[in-house]
Image (cartoon, rainbow, N blue to C red):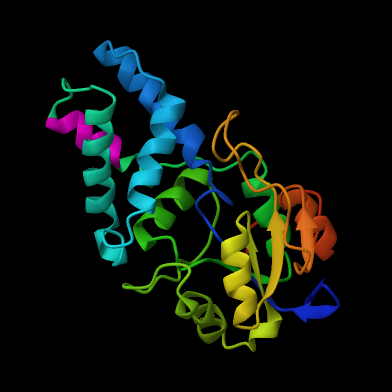
Amino acid sequence: MAVDGGGTDVRALVFDVFGTVVDWHGSIVEEGARLGAARGLAVDWARFANVWRGRYAGDGARAARRSALDPARRAALEETLAEFGIATLGEADKAAFNRVWHRLRPWPDSVAGLTRCGRGSRWRPSPTATSRCWSTWRSTAGCRGTASSRRGLTSPDPAVYRLAPELLDLPPERVMMVAAHGGDLRAARAVGLRTAFVTRPLEFGPDGRPERTPDPACDLVAADFLDLARQLGAYAVGGGPISW
């Protein structure tokens, strides 16, 4: 069954993962708080999370290859620990904390919303998430899916967005990119994909500055994934397995 997005039959949905599907900030804050309680550390974990992410995400050289994301995050973690004056963590603690990126919890609406969006349509995570991260989150969240990653590609490389129609064997205008970030959506639209903006007001924490105003060129604007499912006409009560 096709879904209707902005007047065009959309045959598949492609989702950005980090920040759109999963709450990276809240997950890091929670694990940081547990680590701090266990090791006697008084840390502003909300600020720590934003500084850590900003360091690795903002360094294009270190994140140029997707296969280097874990080392890039670890290098950024070491720098962030030094900035916050944390010098007492052992190797095991730092290695475990760095793996938080493989244990990110979904937003409260993600699993139910993706399930409802998936009824009668195909959807995939964006190639901007590593297969390992996606597989770990998928098993933790209880959601089924297939990771579509290709090493060496990171957003906003246009090849990332061209990859989805290629893998799905669909014309670009039949694929809709769903994200909470204008940059992803602009890049997707530039290669012919339809776009849906989903608001995530707490992506950077209660004091953060998320994107709240969507690009007017977006085909759909949704408050969350359940709202997206309703707008797509794919809403259904109850869950159930997704086949694709």
The span shown in magenta is: 91-98
Q: Which residue is drawn at 75% across and 67% down?
A: 218
User: In the drawing, does residue 67 fall left or right of residue 28?
Assistant: left
Q: Is the magenta stretch mostly helix, strand or loop?
A: helix
Image location (x, y in percent) of residue 136: 40, 50
Instruction: Pick the quarter of the image with the N terminus.
Output: bottom right
| Residue at the image position 47 percent from the left and 75 percent from the top | 160
Residue at 64% across, 84% down:
172
* Residue 211, position as x, y percentages in the image: 65, 48
Residue 99 forms part of the magenta stretch: no
Residue at (21% x, 37% y) in the render: 78
Residue 30 visible in the displayed image: no
Vertical arrangement, residue 40 with respect to residue 221, above or below: above
- Residue farthest along the left direction in this orientation: 91
Residue 51 falls in which quadrant of the image?
A: top left
Q: In this view, does 16 lie to the left or right of 5?
A: left
Q: Where is residue 145 in the image (x, y as percent from the top left)?
A: 52, 62
Quadrant that contains the C terminus? bottom right
Q: Judge by depth and name the residue closer to the eye, 66 or 239.
A: 66
Front-lying residue, 138 or 157: 157
Residue 134 placement (x, y as % from top left): 43, 56
